[in-house]
Image (cartoon, grey):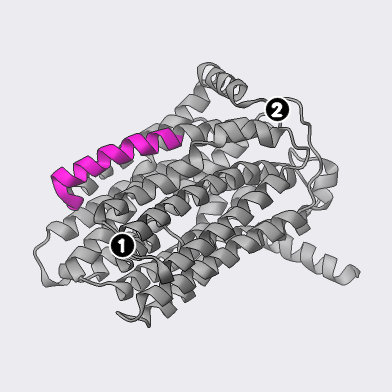
Amino acid sequence: MAAPEISQTHLYEWLTGDEDSRMCRDIPEAACREQPRNFFLHLAASLGNKLADELASARLVLPWLLGVIGAPLWMVGLLVPIRESGALLPQLFVAGFVRLRPERKWAWVLGGLLQAIAAGLLALLALFGSGGIGGGLVLAVLVALSLARGLSSIATKDVLGKTIAKQRRGTLMGWSGSVAGGVTLAAGGVLMLFGDGPGELALAVLLGVASLGWAVNALCAARIEEVPGAVEGGENAWDSIRQGLGLLRDDRNFLHFNLARALLLASALALPYVALLGQEQSGAELGGLGILIVVSGVAAMLASPLWGKRADASSRRVMRDGGLGTAAGCLLGALFAWWPAAWSETIWPYALVYAVLVIVHAGVRLGRKTYVVDMAGADNRALYVALSNTLTGVLMLAVGGVVGLLAQWLGSAGLLAILALMGLAAAASAQRLPEVE
C-alpha cells in the first residue's frame, strides 16, 4: 500500500517542482498531509470541468446548436451574457450559504451534478429541438447551467484555498488547463471529420461528453479530503451585500483589482466576434467549428502550464500581459478583416487570431483567479471571490449590451479595434496592482 502513495507524492513533487510536499503555506497541517492526493483530485475535477466548458461553449458550440435547430438569430446574441452573468451574478448571495457549511465541497458537488444534467438536456435539444421553441429551451437550460456554474465556482475556490497551499494553486490550474486542452483537441479533430455532415448528431455527442465531464468533476470533488472549516461569518444575502460594499470602500487594492478585471473582459468579449468573422468570410459550418475547437485545444494545452508557473510568481504581471495580448490579438483580427486578400476569405487567419486570444484569455482567467485567492485570507476568501464575481457579472451584462450595439454599428472588425483599446487600459490598470504572492 505504501508504493502507490510514494509514487503519487513523487509525481506531485515533479509536477509542482516542490522538493518537499510537506512544506505548506496558509493551510492546516492536516490538509498539508493530504495535499498530494488532493492535488490530483483537483486536477481530475478541473479536467472534467474545463473539457465540459469547451464542449458546451457559449462562444462556439451553442451558437452552432442554435443554427442547426433553426432558432432565430437574435438568440445567439444572448448566449455569452447569459453564460457569464448567470454564473457570476448570484455568487454574492451564495457566499453566505457556502460559508455556513464546515465542508464546502458538497456545494461544489451539487453544482457539478446540476451542470451535468443541464448539458444532457442540451444534448437532447440538439437531437429533438426545432425553431424558436427549441431555441428558447436552449436559453432556459443555459440559465440553469450558468446558475449551477456559479455555485460550483464559489465553492471550488474556497476548497482550493483550504486544501492546496500558496504557490501551488497556479501550477495546479495550469496543468489542468493543459490536459483539458489536449482532450479538447482530440474532440475537435473528430468533429472536423463530420464536415458538413449530420450536425445534430455531432453536437449531441459533444454535449453528451460535456455532461460526463461535469459528472467526473462532481465525483472527484466528493472524494477530496477537506478539513472542516470555521462557519463563523456565514451571512444571509443582504448581510453579504452590506459586507461586500464595505470591502470595496475599505480595501482600495480590492477595488482596483475589480477595475482591472472589468477591463480584462475584452478578452472574453472578443472571442465570439473573431469566430463570427471566420464564419462570415469562409462560409464554414460544422467543419469550421471543428477547426476552431482544435486551435482552442492546442492553444490551451500550450499556454496553461506557462501561465500557471508565472501566476505563482506574479499573478499581477500575468493580468498585465493578458491585457497587452488582448490588444494585439484584437488588432490582428481587425486587420485581417480589413485586408482585401483571398487568403483572408478563409477561416484559417481567424483561427490563428482565435488561438492567440484563447492563449491570452487563459492567462487572464488564471491570473485573476490566482490573484483573488492569494489576496484574500482564509476567513474572507469566499466573500472576496463572490463579490468580485458578482460585480463582473453586472458589468458583463452592461458591457455586453454596449458591445452588441457597437458591433451593429461598427461591424465585427471595428468592434475588435475598440476592444483592443480596452485591453491596453486593462494592462495599464493591472500594472499598478500590488504583488500578493
Residue, disc 1: 131
User: At label 2, which amino acid type do we have?
Assistant: Gly
Identified at 29% across, 46% down, the residue is 327
From this viewpoint, is residue 165 visible? Answer: no
Identified at 91% across, 70% down, the residue is 1
Tell me residue 367's x, y (percent): 50, 45
Tell me residue 152's x, y (percent): 61, 47
Magenta span: chief secondary structure: helix
From this viewpoint, is residue 10 visible? Answer: yes
Q: Are marks 2 and 1 in contact (CB under 8 Å)?
A: no
321 left or right, relative to 249: left
The residue tagged with tag 1: helix, strand or loop?
A: helix
Residue farthest along the left direction in this orientation: 340
362 left or right, relative to 377: left
* Distance Cα–Cα, label 2 vs label 1: 45 Å
Residue count near mark 1 (Cα–Cα under 10 Å), binned few <14, some 14–19, many ≥20:
some
**Label ID, residue 234:** 2
Q: Which residues are the magenta region?
A: 392-413
The quadrant of the picture occupied by the C terminus is top right
For the residue pair 394 and 381, the one nearer the viewer reads as: 394
Tell me residue 201's x, y (percent): 42, 76
Identified at 42% across, 75% down, the residue is 202
Q: Identify the mark nearer the N-term, 2 or 1.
A: 1
164 left or right, relative to 147: right
Closer mark to the observer between disc 2 and disc 1: 1
In the rendered image, the vertical position of residue 432 relative to residue 246, given as above or below: below
